[in-house]
Amino acid sequence: MTRPGPTDPRDGPVPADDVLSIRGLSVGFAGFTVLDGIDLTVRAGELVCIVGESGSGKSLTALATMGLAPPGARIAADCLRFTGRDLLPLTERERQTLRGNEMAMIFQEPMTSLNPVMTVGEQIMEPLRQHRRMGARQARETALAMLSRVQVPAPEARFDQYPHQLSGGLRQRVMIAMALVCRPRLLIADEPTTALDVTIQAQILRLVDELRHEMGTSILFITHDLAVVSEIADRIAVIYAGRIVEEGTRDDIFDDPQHPYTLALFAALPRPEDKGRDLASIRGQVPGPDAMPGGCRFAPRCPFAIEKCRAERPPLLDMPGRAHRVACWRAPLEESVR
């Protein structure tokens, strides 16, 4: 089947309803390129999930967007805009006026992200005092209201406690309260439920989704858990070895996955009928930044690879007739190979 010509996302202006627009984002360290040409959009009120194995570049994409990439990172992009504002030329001081105010982030492990020598209340009030110039009384009232909103029991008692005095689930709720207390336009959540049991995880996911609709906040949600994605995503971007290999709506990706890597992720999901059997796995591993193969980076692990896959990098192209993009020379995949 003949594929349509490439649609270059760098053509034309950034749409007005795009809260975050990333085009051609690359991040490198010491001569190695880790992220290589990331294109990603988050629209107003939308929840976009980035999925992929550990080491694929999910967290680095978020950190580069927030201006929190590790020291020594070389960041380049054709476009890195937040609500139409170019983020690349901003000074660190200008970045700080955005972080915690218009852009916020929830990190993987709240125990290492919360300040152990500050009370919960002090940490939630800090962005209010810094960005909204609230006095102590108003900041306290607003912080207590947010603790109540994220369903922290006995918020006045928790307000004066330290992070080590709270359970993992409560610490995560505190992190959400800190991130949302200034009602940001964009929230980046980096695997916020990884360390929680399934019951607390479900509560946190439901809470995040409720707050999104209540506040109109756009969310970029990073996870490796496809079960989580199936519950919350509007759109999904599948990342592998620093490149987006497939992107589409939740229905597109779950009902009609097209990239062999996406298929492999689904094949590795545990199923009740597989009880007692060995879990399926993806052969090989994500290549390190010093060992990236030419062409399609998934080709060495792909059972459907042809010679062209090893020789040429496939562009991320639109699937015919829908907003579903895939970077694979063999797409659309024939039913016989799926």
Image (spheres, helix red, strand yellow):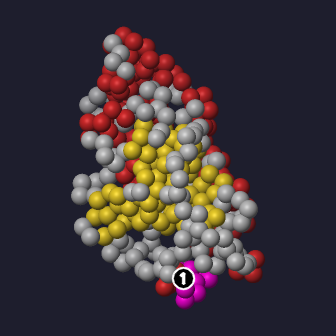
Write the start and end of the magenta stretch as one range: 301-308
Image height of 46 relative to 313, above or below? above
Image height of 321 relative to 302, above or below? above
| Residue at position x 54%, y 82% in the image | 309
**Depth check, front residue: 139 or 245:** 245
**Depth check, front residue: 271 or 89:** 89
**Magenta run includes residue 309:** no
Asked if one can make out residue 205 in the rendered structure from this viewpoint, the answer is no
Q: Position of residue 239 (x, y in %)?
A: 51, 63
Q: Magenta stretch mostly in which secondary structure?
A: loop
Amino acid type, residue under disc 1 in the picture: Cys
Report the residue that reaches farthest toward the right: 335
Q: Residues within 10 Å of mark 1 (few under 14, many from 20)?
A: many
Query: Would residue 15 be found to the left or right of residue 29 on screen?
Result: right
Q: Quadrant of residue 111?
A: top left
Q: Indicate the quadrant containing the C terminus: top left, top right, bottom left or bottom right.
A: bottom right
Query: Would residue 255 be found to the left or right of residue 266 on screen?
Result: right
Q: Position of residue 189 (x, y in %)?
A: 48, 44
Query: Would residue 314 be found to the left or right of residue 113 on screen?
Result: right
**Depth check, front residue: 122 or 254:** 254
Q: Quadrant of residue 336?
A: bottom right
Q: Position of residue 131 (x, y in %)?
A: 35, 25
Report the residue that reaches farthest toward the front: 12
Asked if one can make out residue 74 in the rendered structure from this viewpoint, the answer is yes
Q: Indicate the quadrant containing the N terminus: top left, top right, bottom left or bottom right.
A: bottom right
Q: Which residue is mark 1?
A: 309
| Residue at position x 60%, y 28% in the image | 214
Query: Would residue 228 be found to the left or right of residue 53 on screen?
Result: right
**Magenta run includes residue 304:** yes
**Depth check, front residue: 47 or 53:** 47
